[in-house]
Image (cartoon, rainbow, N blue to C red):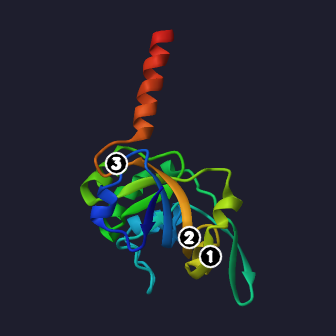
Amino acid sequence: MIQLTSPFTDDGMRALKVGDEVAISGTLFTGRDVVHKYLHEGGSLPAGVNLRDGILYHCGPVVLPENGGWRVVAAGPTTSSREEPYQAQIIEKFGLRGVIGKGGMGARTLEACRKFGCVYLHAVGGAAQVLAECIKKVRGVSFLEQFGSPEAIWELEVEQFPAVVTMDAHGRSLHQEIFAASQSELIKRL
């Protein structure tokens, strides 16, 4: 298991390869469909939110108020392919080093990962409560009133958050490889 701690570096992310298992500690930011579209269309990040050398988690966490703050009770990944129209531009513009989600992303995102030293990390779907246990603190929330809880940007402090590299900064995508192998096998059977 490779330990990753924020802020994440170009060299550190370029050293990762498809199939590497990682444990992330430090700060993650969540962002789903509405945030991606907003940023893609020229919207600004709120004061205090800096994605440079960070990781954006495709997640709409279930968050409850607790003792004047927040507690995350479920934090599973959402399907990343919905962000494909926006992700490459956001990686470039905001200096992301990683994206976490499920299901993989397409060629434009893969090229942005290669060009800008970013990786796509797959988190296990269906493990929302287990992943929430890795979240030690909610540091802040932005766009809560504007976009609603699942679409807000949540700043999370995590420890040993598990993920697997499935798209690396060398142009390799496990998702593309599995699709190509499946297509090849299907053709053989027809």
Q: Could you say whether the residue bearing mark 1 is in a helix, strand or loop? A: strand
Looking at the picture, how far across and down is residue 149, in whole percent?
A: 65, 72
Of the numbered discs in the image, which one, if any, rests on residue 110? 3
Q: Residue at x 28, y 64 (%)?
A: 10
Near mark 1 (Cα within 10 A), the count class, few <14, some 14-19 or many ≥20, is some
Q: Are marks 3 and 2 in contact (CB under 8 Å)?
A: no
Q: CA distance from mark 1 to mark 3?
A: 31 Å
Amino acid carrying label 2: it is Glu
Quarter of the rendering containing residue 128: bottom right
Amino acid carrying label 1: it is Lys
Near mark 3 (Cα within 10 A), the count class, few <14, some 14-19 or many ≥20, is many
Q: Where does label 2 land, which residue?
A: 159
Q: Residue at x 44, y 80 (%)?
A: 49
Q: Earlier in the sequence, mark 2 or mark 1?
A: 1
Nearer-the-camera pick, 88 or 17: 17
As displayed, is residue 17 above or below residue 61?
A: above
Near mark 2 (Cα within 10 A), the count class, few <14, some 14-19 or many ≥20, is some
Q: Is residue 32 visible?
A: yes
Looking at the picture, how far across and down is residue 67, in whole percent?
A: 74, 89
Q: Could you say whether the residue bearing mark 3 is in a helix, strand or loop? A: helix
Q: Earlier in the sequence, mark 3 or mark 2?
A: 3
Q: Is residue 153 visible?
A: no
Q: Are marks 2 and 1 in contact (CB under 8 Å)?
A: yes
Between label 3 and label 2, give the one nearer the viewer. Answer: 2
Left or right: 69, with 27 as reference point? right
Q: CA distance from mark 3 to mark 2?
A: 27 Å
Number of labels in the image equals: 3
Q: Where does label 1 land, which residue?
A: 136
Q: CA distance from mark 2 to mark 1?
A: 7 Å
Quarter of the rendering containing residue 159: bottom right
Amino acid carrying label 3: it is Leu
